[in-house]
Image (cartoon, rainbow, N blue to C red):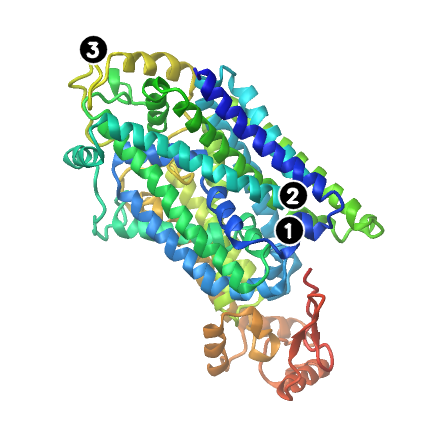
Amino acid sequence: MLGILDIILLAASLLVTLAIGVYHGVKGRKATPAEYMLGGRAMSPLPLAMSMMVGTISPITIMGNIGEMYAYGTQLWIMDVGLALGMVVVAEMFIPIFYPMHMVSLYQYIEQRFRSKVLRLSSVLITLLAAYLFIGFLLYPPSTFLVHFTGLGIIPNIVIMGLVCGLYSAFGGVKAVVHTDVVQSMVMLVGVLAIVVQCTIRVGGLESAWSIASERGRIEFYSMSLDPYQRHSFWLTLVFGFFFSLSTYGVNQSQTQRTFSTGSVQHAKRVIYYAIFGMLLLRFLINLAGVVIFAFYADCDPLTMGGVVKSNLRIVVVYVLQDLTSIPGLAGLFVASIYAAVLSSVSTQVNSMTALLWEDFLKNLKVFETWSEVTITYLQKLLVFLTGVIGIVMSLIATNSPAFISRLFRLTGAISGPMVGLFLTGLYLPWVKGKSAGFGFLLSIVFSLWIVTGQLLTRTDPPYLPMSHTNCTTTTTTNTTTTTTTASVINTSLTTAMPDITSVSSDGEIDDNHNPQEGMAALYGLSYCLNYCWGSIACLVLAALASLLAGWNTPDTIDERLIAPTAWKIFKKLPPPSYEPPLQKLARLISPHADSYATNSSADRSPKEQDGRQSRLDGHLLQDGHDGTFHAKSEEIVPMMKIT
């Protein structure tokens, strides 16, 4: 249990969080929707970067990464390199195209690029479904951790975290979320640092801890094998980190909303680059905590004590209960960091989900046409709070079926790769039309769900690296030995109050074993690190193939500013295929009067399309209006949507 000083520190962190929300709520009580959801697009890059950093580091990241380093070694650490590379790609290739569109909902790009409202709304619905599950998944695991320290049950911990998060997010909007994230980032840094410093002192210094971990086979960075069936390698974790980064920072509303909230493209890029530095620092400390905790338990592993293998997520709980609570305040700092990780991650989700609900579904309803901006802002506040309540309900459901919820969450995570592929198709395959992109997106989701389902049905948790129990019977606590109280901590507190949620790694992936099979089932044996990659590539390939059958865009039928510059240059130089697309030909044979929009001969175009093409050739290109609407200098050449 926590001492008085620990409780004071924990309560102070929660009260500061609520105070910031109330302050911004009172200050911005007459805020417009744009100010509430995007801070008026005038927020400073540094706090936005700190918010982005902690918004993607959840309690599962902290507990999972520490457990990963402890039980399997440091190879997953290379994932951070891939994350950084992916964020650079987002800053240099995604933001210059997305930011000038002045969007609130990222998925406005989908409708604008593919001229398909159905595709936009479908992608938003899938995103919202995954986000609701994610909130429930975020609240449940740390609540099982907090049982041991707060004296409260799992359900009260869930309700407290959910309500605190919902209240300050609803009161102050994105400004409250961002500025509380700044405070929470400091709390998380200090909390994790408390473990690293205390545990390092206990094992005789950082050099000693690293040496112990190396001798026991925990230090590994350069497993350069190209075998895709192994669990981790340098290349697998690098690819995993890269595509995970594209998914999280490039095509995810919760993070792109941070870049949309600043004042220019250059400021938006700074948000990403500042976040790279903060993310690498915090993840470095989390991973290092796993190494030094292993050194502490090197000769008395509590996870395999008594022949029963326990989840590696539990190791940080064991250490904090056994050692960190001996120094007043340190356990409180770490528990506060867990709270901070929950609140920052959940607040990011509820804020972004409300933006999607309003922009993509509610905004255009007639009932809201006469509402004032201030009234709409109050409605958005209510939606934020209700989203937090729904998250609480989802988490309460998880208390009755944790394994089912974690597996369902992983299935919804199968859309992450296809979502990356859909946006990459829009940016880098300019000839692909909406129907072809939708076809590729749908089939790639089916493909990803098939692979993930097969993995869930055929995989088993991999065995931990060798553990030792040689000094478990000693009665004194030294650098690398522990007393027999370790056994009591595991066998009483954790066994009864912290049920397994399956073996979950740092970013929501279920650990898998090297288990290749024959035939089609061999796909299930591929490393989970490739799942994001396969989904993205499948969407790109299927969309490109579908365009060869169904028809394609030409340079005069698409806006250049929606395409990556390099892809546009290639697109303009390559001649279009000279044959008539098979599906278009079939449609023409069935209905002779069918419009052959995708063909390249002027005879097949309507007069309006020919005039539009000529207008473009005459130099009457589209230009931006001050209100964010795409206008034409002469006539409306290609129907374009208003971007709010």
**Mark 1 element type:** helix
What's the mark number on residue 173?
2
Which residue is farthest bottom?
Answer: 618
Q: Are marks 2 and 1 in contact (CB under 8 Å)?
A: yes
Which residue in the structure is indicated by mark 1? 39
Amino acid identity at mark 2: Gly
Give the residue at x 48% y 62%. Answer: 424
Q: Nearer the viewer, residue 34 or 19?
A: 19
Which residue is at 26% across, 50% downward? 234
Task: Give amino acid for label 1.
Answer: Gly
Note whether residue 441 is visible.
Answer: yes
Residue at (27% x, 46% y) in the render: 229
Q: Earlier in the sequence, mark 2 or mark 1?
A: 1
The N terminus lies in which quarter of the figure?
top left
Q: Quadrant location of the C terminus?
A: bottom right
| Residue at image mark 3 | 475
